Amino acid sequence: MTSTRGRTTSRASASRTLVIRLAPLPSVLIANRGEIAVRIATTARALGMRTIAVYSDADSQAPHVQAADEAWHIGPSSPRESYLVAERILDVAKRSGAASIHPGYGFLSENAAFAEACANAGIVFVGPPASAIRAMGLKDAAKALMQAAQVPVVPGYHGERQETDFLRTKAYEIGYPVLIKAVAGGGGKGMRRVDRQIDFDAALESAQREAANAFGDPRVLVEKYVSSPRHVEIQVFGDSHGNVVSLFERDCSLQRRHQKVIEEAPAPGMSAEMRRAMGEAACAAAKAVGYVGAGTVEFIADGSDGLRANGFYFMEMNTRLQVEHPVTEAITGLDLVALQFHVAAGHPLPFSQSDLKINGHAVEARLYAEEPERGFLPSTGKLHAVKFASTTTFRVAPDGVRIDSGVRTGGEVSPYYDPMIAKIIAHGRTRDEALDRLSQELEASLVAGPKTNARFLIRLANLPEFRSGTFDTGTIERHIETLAPAHAPAAPAVVAAGAAHVFAVPSSPADESPWNDRSGFQLGGARSVPVSLRVDEETIQVRMMHSASGVTFEIAGETVVPHPGARLVPANDGVIVLEDQRQVQVSRPNPRDILDAAVAGDGAIRAPMHGKVTLIAVEAGGRVTKGDKLAIVEAMKMEHALLASADGVVAEVLAAAGDQVSQGAVLLRVEADA
Ligand code: ADP
Ligand code: ADP
Ligand code: MG
């Protein structure tokens, strides 16, 4: 904050426009995938830069490939064989003539050797100098460095000694609860909270084991577990002329297993005094390591008594662009990626601290392919639909919403990469306005295929403890029963909506496609037929009724009208029905499932439902082999082949083609070979 001091606001805003218009570097290779790769490409192209994507086998059709001017294949789907292979990415950079490499977040973004290799190859690494990455790479060394720079750190032991007895003694001196942390840690791994001395040894051992596995380094530090912890981080920006500014804070206290879920800016309850103190501490931290570019200094604040200017401690510095950077963009009006290119090209920051102002409030939610109702199990597979009400990507639209996504309908959530589907960002004049917008946008979002955490996020955005601003990093865990209750059985009206679609029933009597004609099934006076339905993992029997007012179903003894508001996405030979962000798959049962039910121990082959026999494929006395087609029964549009479940001889044929049969009627008997 030296050479830019004293600039006027008007000059600052003029140069801010300049940042957007200049092509600071001629080209960039984006060494990443998914939403962040698309986001970087969007800004780079707007700046007039040539954009170069890289992709693995799994990503050949991915949106980030299409978002760039050219794309290079770098290997198999596993990140270890593609996005993490520094030599291969550098090789593509050289062959494509890339002037710079943007690493995004994750992957190679905090790899000092990679940053160095870029510099050695004469390619600009869009990030801090390798020395700054290295200085902040290990949590113990970073804490020591910060202490020397007068930045408050969490009290604890971050020295070299690692013996169990010694660390246990240190934990006792620090005072329980304590937190054991992997010095090489990231992503919440290798971290254990210990509340009582008696549990210390076991927790230490498991933290060390996890750290050795995840980071190849078993070393840990022990620090005080801050009570009512609030995660408040400062976005900093440095240039190569020695200037560092704070772009204010983000509150990321809504966490699950030390991983961020919803982030916002500014932090609720933050005073101007504390903001200044934290901003200064963060800038001091960045300056202590000669920081250039976008970085985040993460602090833990003791929120037991509200946020206090003397109650925050340095945790770590992330030397890269952060997943949650859009909330900072929303409240400052800046494009952080454009700024990254600007300072990477050697230009000074186009503004000083006093030019920066907070405008309104912004929140971001991470929409993941996971199932909170089943312990947050990851959910992969084809995306049959991905649709948002707001279509503005990578910048906040006038309606206050921004969607950052790197997937699309027809794509896939694969097991190889982070299962994030999108980041939904909402901006408003007030916190409530921003949270209302976030909640509405989540309600309107449509993702079919992999299960998502949308319902969980909506509940979280409206949780009173969060809305009132009195939350901390334990809030989600404390309310997990309310936020992620186990699935109740699918609502009958939702099942009926799916069934109506599956059997192609006209939605209204006015519809010119009488179901009788379509199905070839004689309804007679009853206009009611039993049908089998597959609902998620279960096969159920329901009755379908047609009347002047439309179709209804009898499910578990109740007459049910199809849910009028349910959203339907054809998928997997059936339909995915979405209601209240819950997905229910409804389809016709697989004939095999029915057969299993139809074949009784006596060798009787029974009609799986009321219907018409359209074929008897065997004769009495004939031999059949397992899997042979025995008969076909048709009901509505379903045709069910009945197959032999074992080798044997047809003992008896009791039905003929054209017969109307009722469910359970014996059609033939097969005597299986002994
Ligand atoms: P943030 O604070 O920005 O959320 P995280 O450390 O949680 O940062 O992770 C940022 C991104 O980097 C996430 O997409 C995460 O999956 C990825 N990531 C985190 N740690 C690793 C790692 N060790 N290797 C590869 N990717 C990682
Ligand atoms: P990582 O590299 O995995 O992101 P951090 O040191 O940033 O590790 O910690 C991750 C999360 O763990 C923080 O966001 C915070 O919620 C929690 N945490 C870390 N240190 C403490 C502490 N001393 N007291 C309480 N919570 C902490
Ligand atoms: Mg962290």
Image (cartoon, rainbow, N blue to C red):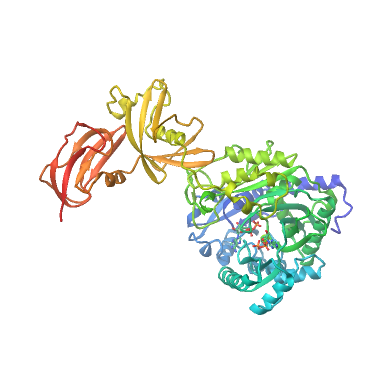
- Image position of 497 with respect to 67: above or below: above
Q: Residue furthest left?
A: 621
* Residue drawn 27% across the image and 35% down it: 634
Q: For residue 664, which quarter of the picture?
A: top left
Q: Nearer the viewer, residue 527 or 451?
A: 527
Q: Nearer the viewer, residue 87 or 526?
A: 526
- Report x, y in % for residue 255: 64, 54
- Image position of 399 with respect to 40: above or below: above
- Report x, y in % for residue 219: 64, 74
Quarter of the C terminus within the rendering:
bottom left
Quarter of image, ligand 3: bottom right
The reply to whether residue 405 is in sight is no
Q: Nearer the viewer, residue 277 or 130?
A: 277
- Report x, y in % for residue 525: 29, 21
- Report x, y in % for residue 146: 77, 68
- Image position of 425 with respect to 146: above or below: above
Q: Nearer the viewer, residue 656 or 615?
A: 656
* Residue drawn 85% across the image and 55% down it: 4
- Image position of 80 with respect to 350: above or below: below
The reply to whether residue 299 is in sight is yes
Quarter of the N terminus within the rendering:
bottom right
